[in-house]
Image: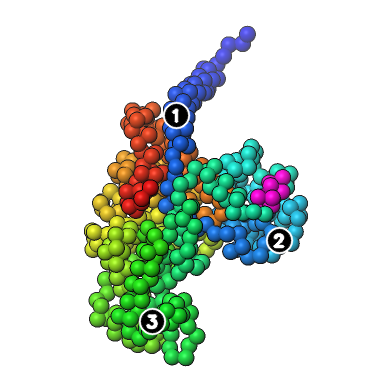
Amino acid sequence: MKKMNIRTFVILLVAACGISALTGCKSENYPVYTRIRNHADEIRVINTHEHQRLPEAYGDYHFRFYHLMAASYLSADITSAGADAGNWELIDSLGTDQLWDVYGEALNHSRGTSYYSHFVRGFRKLYGFNDLYFTRKNISRLSKEIEENYKDYGSWFDKAFRESGFEIMFVDQFWKPFNTELDDRYFALVFQVGPLITESGRKPEKGDHLKSVYRLAAEAGHEIATLDDYLAFCDTLFRRNIRSGAVCIKNAQAYERSLYYEDVPFDEARALYSRPSVSLTPQEIKKLEDYTFHWMIRQATGYNLPVQIHTGYLAGNGNVLENGDPLKLNNLFLKYPGAKFDIFHGAFPWTDEFTALGKMFPNVYLNLVWLPQISREKTVSTLDVMLDCVPYNKILWGGDCGLIEESAGSLEFGKDVVCEVLAGRIKRGLLTEEAAFDIVEGIFRDNAIILFRLSI
């Protein structure tokens, strides 16, 4: 036998140590992780943010796999990879084999993303899908199952909802924000106030076709001539939503403007509202919106409704990312210590700033909603830092999806991440299993019950 040179010996030794370390890590962590994960699966989950709607709300389509893909976050990655995932007419007109020819390459290019992985997880949970990736063949099989399930979506939704482990979903109906009718077997109402803020700076002139808030007010016999009138009708909507069981208000204006809301005096806002909206500069319109959101926070505080705010990354393809910087909200957190702010999405990519705000302000709660889908690995590191910095009764979770398959995947993905972080902290001697059980119960259920004062 030839003598082994020192360089080869060192390489083999390092490799052996590395394999041993990896194996040791797995053998030590896996049973702990499994116990925490099993405990998580026993929790009836309070999902603090969703956009669930009936399939027909998307249009008159014959739902199969590629329709679900088009309605999912994965569609943004497919578009980034070079295929137009938003072409619903094309998707509805072609067979699954033809659609693989259109989308297969972009799907394959997206196999590494969290949007892709969490979408897969939903089919694993609900359809017994065992593959790591989508292929021409397994998509054809899934499409047949989806088509069958969607023949009676109500029954399918009920089955999938319960199999996924949900108890209730908070639903933000941004596509019809003034609707207060929801099936309370599954859903809790979120009062989407974005349109009310936006329309404060877009008052119609006499003879204009009324739309949005102003049409709703006219239908209710509420005349709006002054800012006082406008705010009085907004309060009517507050009370209508509360009677219908609203658990919070929601502001998603980062999709259209900065999250910095200046503290505008009432007299200045009233004077601006009295002028024709077409005469206002963009800066003056922003001042009206700023005043209105401050007013909304005061009303929400008076009605004991938490304030949910979209921060960070913006869904879809193309927008002004800087709008979502959570530090722009700092003045609101200082001015309204009695309000309870539930800020969303880990404010990705400002995850450290997000965590710091939760640590600094007792009235700021940190919601992991959608963050695992954006980046699983960033959520692992972010949650670890959050647990270093913030009491865990201030951490919540939500799915932020439109159809039940994706919501099921988002919950599975969220549980995976939370349990992985907790198992790692136990291994490092930072937690006991008993404390980890408390934390997972808090994130997926108990913290939401307390913050939103749920009668469950």
Please give the label number shown on residue 35: 1
Q: Tell me where residue 418 appears, x and y as whole percent.
A: 43, 39
Label 3 to label 1, Cα distance in Å? 57 Å
Residue at position x 49%, y 42% in the image? 165
Most foreground residue, 141 or 20: 141
How many C-alpha atoms fall within 10 Å of the one at disc 2: few (<14), some, or many (≥20)? some
Instruction: Please report the bounds of the magenta region as a residue range.
Output: 141-150
Looking at marks 3 and 2 on the same chain, the residue that comes earlier in the sequence is marked by: 2
How many C-alpha atoms fall within 10 Å of the one at disc 1: few (<14), some, or many (≥20)? some
Instruction: Examine the rendering and report whether any part of residue 246 can be seen.
Output: yes
Q: Tell me where residue 167 appears, x and y as whole percent.
A: 46, 47
Residue at position x 41%, y 44% in the image? 444
The amino acid on which the numbered mark 2 sits, given as a three-letter code, is Asp
Residue at position x 30%, y 54% in the image? 364
Q: Is residue 94 above or below residue 13?
A: below
Query: Mainly helix, strand or loop, the magenta region?
Result: helix
Q: Are marks 3 and 2 in contact (CB under 8 Å)?
A: no
Q: Which residue is mark 3?
A: 222
Quarter of the image for residue 432 reads top left
Q: Is residue 258 above or below residue 119?
A: below
Q: Tell me where residue 320 appears, x and y as whole percent.
A: 46, 65
